Image: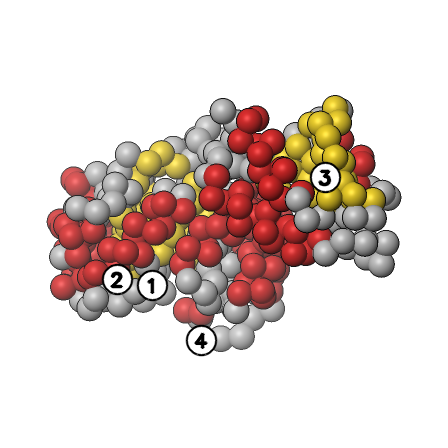
C-alpha cells in the first residue's frame, strides 16, 4: 500500500480513492477568467487544482483564488527555485518541482526544508519533454524513473517525506512502463497522466489506454487527464475513466449500443437528447442506464441495467432490472425515461 500524503486537507494514497486533479489554463494576467475556470473545475469534480507559477505576481493569485474555491491549490514550478519558496510562503498546499530544470541539490534542500515547516507537499514531476535526446520507449521509462528517484533521495536526506511522484510521457508505452517500474521501487503516491496527449479524440484515447492500464492493476493515486481542450473536459474524462473501472462512482452511467443496420430508430439522436435531459436532472445516484437499439443485445442489457430501454422497430420497452415498467416509442422515450428517473430518485 502507498504512503498517505496530503495536499492541504486532501488525502492521497493509502486507502483513499484515486483523486482527480485539474489545471488552470487561463492566463494569469486575467484573474477573472482564472476564477471562473477554477469555479468550473470545482463544480465538475476536481479535487485539487494546479496553477502555473511563472513569476512573482502569479504566486500572489493564491489569495484571490482562495476567496472563490475551497479546493487545495498546487503551484507548478519550473526553472526558478525562488518561485517555489515564494509559493510555499504564500500558502500553496502543494508544489510541483521538475528535476530536469531545478536540478541543484542546494536549491532542492532549501525548498524541502521550507515545505516541511509549512506542511506543504511536493510532487516530483518528470516529463519526457524535458530530455533533449531520443530514446526507445523502455529506455526513456528507465531514464525518467532514475531521474525521479535520484531527486526523491535528495528530499529524503533532509527528512522530507510528504512526496508524490509523477512520470509522464507523450508516448503511452513509456508512461505505462515507467510507472510500472516506479511502483516497484517506492511507496510514495503516484500521480498519473499522459502528457502532451494531443487533440481531444487522440488525447482521450491515449489517456484512457495509459491511465486505465495502470489503474486496473492498482497503480496510481491521483490522475490528471491532459487534453488540448477546455479544462472542464479533462475532469469529465478523468471521472469517466475512474467510473468505467468501478474505482469511483460519480453519477448515472449511460450504456448505449453502437447501432448497426438492424437499428430502426435514430438512437444517436435519442441518446444525445436523453444525455442533455439527464444532465439537467443533476442526479448523483450511480445508476446504470441502458439505451439499446435492437433485439439482439437490447433486452439483456436493459434487463441487467438499473433502468433500461430496448427498441424493436419504433417501439420501446422500459425496464427496471428484471421488471417491465411499460412501453414507449422513439418520439416519447426520452420524456418517459426521465419521468421514471424522477420517481426513482425522489
- Tags 2 and 1 touching, CB below 8 Å: no
Mark 2 to mark 4 CA distance (whole Å)? 34 Å
Who is closer to the viewer here, 31 or 11? 31
- Residue 25 is marked as 1
Mark closest to the chain's N terminus, 2 or 1: 1
Q: Nearer the viewer, mark 2 or mark 1?
A: 2
Residue occupying the point 35% across, 56% down: 23
On the image, the x and y values in percent for residue 100 come to: 36, 65
- Residue 33 is marked as 2
Mark 4 to mark 1 CA distance (whole Å)? 26 Å
On the image, the x and y values in percent for residue 97 come to: 31, 56
Mark 2 to mark 1 CA distance (whole Å)? 9 Å
On the image, the x and y values in percent for residue 164 come to: 38, 45
Residue 344 in the figure: left or right of residue 306:
left
Q: Which residue is mark 4?
A: 132
Mark 3 to mark 2 CA distance (whole Å)? 45 Å
Mark 4 to mark 3 CA distance (whole Å)? 61 Å
Mark closest to the chain's N terminus, 3 or 2: 2
Q: Secondary structure at mark 3?
A: strand
- Tags 4 and 1 touching, CB below 8 Å: no
Q: Quadrant of residue 215?
A: top right
Q: Nearer the viewer, mark 3 or mark 2?
A: 3
Residue occupying the point 48% across, 34% down: 284
- How packed mark 2 is, by other alpha carbons closer than 10 Å (few <14, some 14-19, many 20 or more), is some
Q: Secondary structure at mark 1?
A: loop
Q: Which residue is mark 3?
A: 328
Q: Nearer the viewer, mark 4 or mark 1?
A: 1
Q: Nearer the viewer, mark 2 or mark 4?
A: 2
Amino acid at each position: 500500500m502507498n504512503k498517505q500524503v496530503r495536499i492541504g486537507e486532501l488525502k492521497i494514497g493509502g486507502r483513499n480513492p484515486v483523486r482527480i486533479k485539474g489545471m488552470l489554463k487561463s492566463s494569469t494576467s486575467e484573474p477573472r477568467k482564472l476564477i471562473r475556470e477554477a469555479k468550473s473545475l470545482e463544480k465538475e469534480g476536481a479535487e485539487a487544482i494546479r496553477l502555473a507559477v511563472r513569476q512573482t505576481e502569479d504566486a500572489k493569485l493564491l489569495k484571490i483564488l482562495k476567496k472563490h474555491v475551497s479546493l487545495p491549490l498546487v503551484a507548478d514550478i519550473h526553472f526558478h527555485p525562488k518561485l517555489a519558496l515564494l509559493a510555499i510562503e504564500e500558502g500553496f498546499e502543494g508544489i510541483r518541482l521538475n528535476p530536469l530544470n531545478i536540478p541543484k541539490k542546494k536549491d532542492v534542500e532549501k525548498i524541502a526544508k521550507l515545505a516541511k515547516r509549512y506542511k506543504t507537499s511536493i510532487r516530483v514531476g518528470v516529463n519526457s519533454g524535458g530530455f533533449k535526446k531520443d530514446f526507445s520507449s523502455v529506455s526513456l521509462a528507465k531514464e525518467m524513473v532514475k531521474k525521479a528517484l535520484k531527486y526523491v533521495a535528495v528530499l529524503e536526506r533532509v527528512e522530507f517525506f510528504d512526496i508524490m511522484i509523477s512520470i509522464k510521457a507523450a508516448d503511452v508505452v513509456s508512461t505505462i512502463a515507467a510507472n510500472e517500474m516506479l511502483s516497484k521501487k517506492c511507496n510514495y503516491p503516484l500521480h498519473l497522466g499522459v502528457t502532451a496527449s494531443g487533440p481531444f479524440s487522440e488525447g482521450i484515447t491515449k489517456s484512457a489506454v495509459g491511465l486505465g492500464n495502470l489503474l486496473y492493476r492498482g497503480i496510481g493515486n491521483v490522475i490528471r487527464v491532459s487534453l488540448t481542450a477546455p479544462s472542464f473536459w479533462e475532469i469529465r474524462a478523468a471521472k469517466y475513466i475512474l467510473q468505467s473501472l468501478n474505482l469511483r462512482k460519480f453519477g448515472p452511467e449511460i450504456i448505449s449500443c453502437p447501432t448497426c443496420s438492424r437499428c430502426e430508430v435514430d438512437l444517436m439522436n435519442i441518446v444525445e437528447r436523453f444525455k442533455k435531459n439527464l444532465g439537467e436532472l443533476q442526479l448523483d445516484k450511480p445508476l446504470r442506464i441502458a439505451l439499446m437499439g435492437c433485439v439482439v443485445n437490447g433486452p439483456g442489457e436493459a434487463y441487467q441495467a438499473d433502468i433500461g430501454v430496448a427498441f424493436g422497430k419504433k417501439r420501446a420497452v422500459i425496464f427496471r432490472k428484471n421488471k417491465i415498467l411499460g412501453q414507449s416509442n422513439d418520439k416519447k422515450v426520452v420524456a418517459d425515461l426521465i419521468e421514471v428517473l424522477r420517481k426513482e430518485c425522489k
